[in-house]
Image (tube, coloured by chain):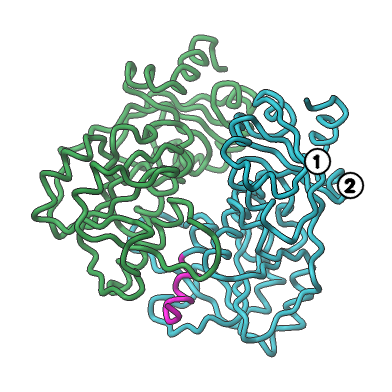
Chain colours: A green, B cyan
Amino acid sequence: MLSKAVIKYINSLQVKKYRNQHQAFVVEGAKSVLELLLSPNFELQHLFVTETFYKEHTAVLDKGFKYDIVTEQELVKAGTFATNNAALAVAGMRNLPPLQVTPKDLVIALDDIRDPGNLGTILRIADWYGIDTVICSEACADFYNPKVISATMGSFTRVKTYYLNLEAWLAEHADKYKVYGASLAGENLHNMKLKPEGIIVLGNEANGIRPEVATHINQLIKIPAFGKAESLNVATATAIIIDNFRRGDA
Amino acid sequence: MLSKAVIKYINSLQVKKYRNQHQAFVVEGAKSVLELLLSPNFELQHLFVTETFYKEHTAVLDKGFKYDIVTEQELVKAGTFATNNAALAVAGMRNLPPLQVTPKDLVIALDDIRDPGNLGTILRIADWYGIDTVICSEACADFYNPKVISATMGSFTRVKTYYLNLEAWLAEHADKYKVYGASLAGENLHNMKLKPEGIIVLGNEANGIRPEVATHINQLIKIPAFGKAESLNVATATAIIIDNFRRGDA
């Protein structure tokens, strides 16, 4: 059974301030919790599973994890999902190594991506395409927001996500690195010979890349339009752009 | 002011049964409402705008639209958005021409895409890439669901979306058409010479393409993976696939 105090603690972790205070976050759903358990990057604090999840994943759970069997109602009460017939975990935040990027790496830099679903989807896309470092401006959605974690579908365990002053960081790197920026005024991606190296900057959902960040971009790129939609969702655009960078690499 | 009866009517249109009964649906937010007003494909029944929206778009509104100025609180009460400082409209459903597809067309076929956000995002992607026809199996999310309309960002006014028995329809067309299906067991997209012609089938978020639909596919395709994510979101996958089909076309 989940005690009132534990439910209160887990609920508090929906708020960034309390996540930071406790250096902990919540992971919900079968796929995400399984990836968490198999990841060497996180320390498990609590693990609650339903009978159903326990029966399906006994082999994993009995590798030495400490867990409690609870009801679906308890999981829903503690977590943020409307339904969760599987599992909920609380883990300590990842201890990231210092950010290291070389001009040979392909890196995604996000300028004020506010929607947690977009950020999570972008991290999943990065993971699919083997990009292990994502840089976020300080106003981006919080990596440990439960909606971000959920949208990554487990990729939160792998993609290293750094928050920093993007403008200052780009200013330091723009002379030695290729810095691409997605913009409707850019060069048509389909006509470019792209190597999977450099920093790709994606901008805010409503306002695009901030001018103080755009000033450090040395190549604007655009996804060619064939119809009448005015724009694409930023996660969609990220996927298409990265796919174009990876084409030569198959 | 919005009367209680009108609020009740608009609220009822959140439910598919009542949308079908009234052959009407709700459009919310500045971008979507503006696209609706400029579209020849829909008949406007009600239009409610805030003072702010009215001031910004007087020129459009005074082209002969009948509208009422209301408060943001009223819009939120009537609609599905948590905030809406712009506009809300009720329109009659589109009168679609009979479905016509030739082997030279590029068409998207969706097999049981259940998430409204995914369906809306896919329609927006179709519109971006100039695909004007999307075919949905009967269990797909409803085109007129407010979450679908919202996620299309106005593309709902252009992309013709048909609901039909996908299995039966493909059975009729598979011999004369190239029918592609997205699958982790498919051929690597990056290595294929693709023409923007044919039917591209995308499957359900959890279960992929149903076997009875898959049997009509004559070319499986996959997006190559470079990292460790197990899958991509279906809207993300649709975008990448269509971009690959359109490459030669720039």
Q: What element carries label 1?
A: loop
Q: Mark 2 lies on which chain?
A: B
Graded by Cα atoms within 10 Å as few (under 14), some (14 to 19) or many (20 or more), the crowding at tag 2 reads some
Return the mark for residue B13: 1
- Separation (CA) of disc 2 from disc 1: 8 Å
Instruction: Name the residue located 59 percent from the left edge and 55 percent from the top edge.
Output: B205
Is residue B30 depicted above or below B179 in this figure? above
Whether label 2 touches label 1, CB < 8 Å: yes
Magenta stretch contains residue B246:
yes
Instruction: Name the residue located 67 percent from the left edge and 23 percent from the top edge.
Output: B73
Boundaries of the magenta span: B240-250
Quadrant of the frame with the C terminus of chain B: bottom left
- Tag 2: amino acid: His
Out of A22 and A38, give the one closest to the viewer.
A22
Give the prevailing secondary structure in the magenta stretch: helix
Q: How many marks?
A: 2
| Residue B245, horizontal then vertical, whole percent | 48, 76
Q: What element carries label 2?
A: helix
- Tag 1: amino acid: Leu
**Residue that numbered label 2 is attached to:** B22
